[in-house]
Amino acid sequence: MGATTSSTMSTDIVAPGERAAIWRDWVWTHFGGLESDLYGDTGFDGHMQASNAGDVVLTKLEANRHRVLRSTQLARGSERAYLKIVAPWRGSAGVQQHHREAWVRPGGWAIYDTTGSYEIANPERVEHLIVMLPKEQLLERGLRLEPLMARHVGGMNGIARVALETMRTTYQELPGMSESAARGAGELIVELVRLSLQELAGRENGTTQLEAFRDRIRKHIGQHLRDPSLTLDHIAQALNCSKRHLHKAFSAEDDTLAHYIQRQRIQACMRELAQPARGAQPPRTITEIAFSWGFNNGAHFSRVFREHTGQSPSDFRESAQRASGSVV
């Protein structure tokens, strides 16, 4: 019998009408201050099982589609600094941080920093391995971490595959490990992640121009997201490049530039719609919010908002305001 400890959380033990709120509480508590939403879905089913390998926390998460968000304010209030890895067994995950976005599917993994704001999209039912590593243990090894966050590290070959298989195998074998063996496995995971990031940094040096160009595109979009005239033509003119060059820069992403802009705008509107009213000042109307984030047609905004969230903007605002009375 192993000496490692584990914890299990399942919505199976909760009445269907209470599952969404309970899941938000669990996510908030287990991952240290994460907000979550369920794309407007009312039915929800989720399970988490976590174990410790020394200072490394490994969690198997299985759940219906949902998103998690760590705001700048929550990140500042974080008690401990972790790097977090998402490695899907099933489904996909989109990691956004530092104006970058990486999508991962089974056989891959991405990494992000809990001391900064980030957003993770799980647009379908997922089964993920989530691995949390103390950030200081990677900093001690002399890596510049910021350029490596929200990157698709790999997992199909090379050291990134060794790291992925070690993380998965460690999670599966932890129940039978002694405490000292589990701690050693955690240290091994940290070292394999370091080597994977070191290799990624080397690859990035070889493809720096393309990735730096993508970062310039995302930064420009972030700075001009409220401008209704933000189009491919305007971006190409501002960055002094062709539209073909813009498309080519995003060709390795599971996205198009137009969809990326639209998604960023929708997510900005979602954040504003979810904010509770402050003081006596009446909240801005949905149309005012939409137009302030670059939309210029109310019907079009409502349609794409529903496609993205599964709810109308007014229903989303109402459910978000209702949930803000509890831990979200």
Image (cartoon, helix red, strand yellow):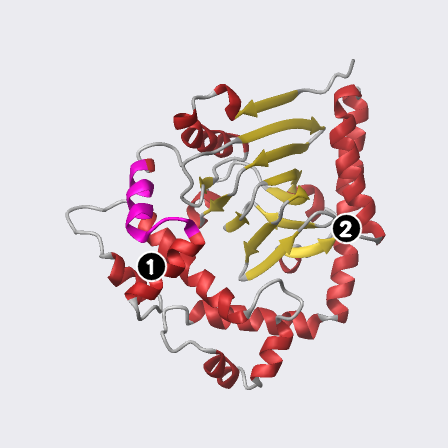
**Residue farthest to the left, as pictured:** 280
Q: Main secondary structure of the magenta part?
A: helix
Quarter holding residue 292: bottom left
User: The C terminus is located in which quarter?
Assistant: top left
Q: Which mark is residue 155?
A: 2
Residue at left offset 15%, top offset 47%: 280
Q: Nearer the viewer, residue 45 or 215?
A: 45
Q: Which mark is residue 302?
A: 1
Which mark is in front, 1 or 2? 1
Residue at left offset 49%, top offset 29%: 26
User: The N terminus is located in which quarter?
Assistant: top right
Residue at left offset 25%, top offset 61%: 287
Residue at left offset 38%, top offset 78%: 229
Mark 1 is on which residue type? Ser
Which residues, given as a range, are shown in magenta?
309-322
- Residue 132 in the image, given as x and y percentages of width and height: 64, 38
Q: State the SS at label 1.
A: helix
Tell me, yes or no, whether the two marked residues, 1 and 2, touch with CB atoms within 8 Å.
Answer: no
Measured Cα–Cα span from mark 1 to mark 2: 38 Å
Is 311 covered by the magenta stretch?
yes
- Can residue 168 be seen from the camera position used here? yes
In primary-sequence order, the first of circles 1 and 2 is: 2
- Residue 19 in the image, given as x and y percentages of width and height: 44, 28
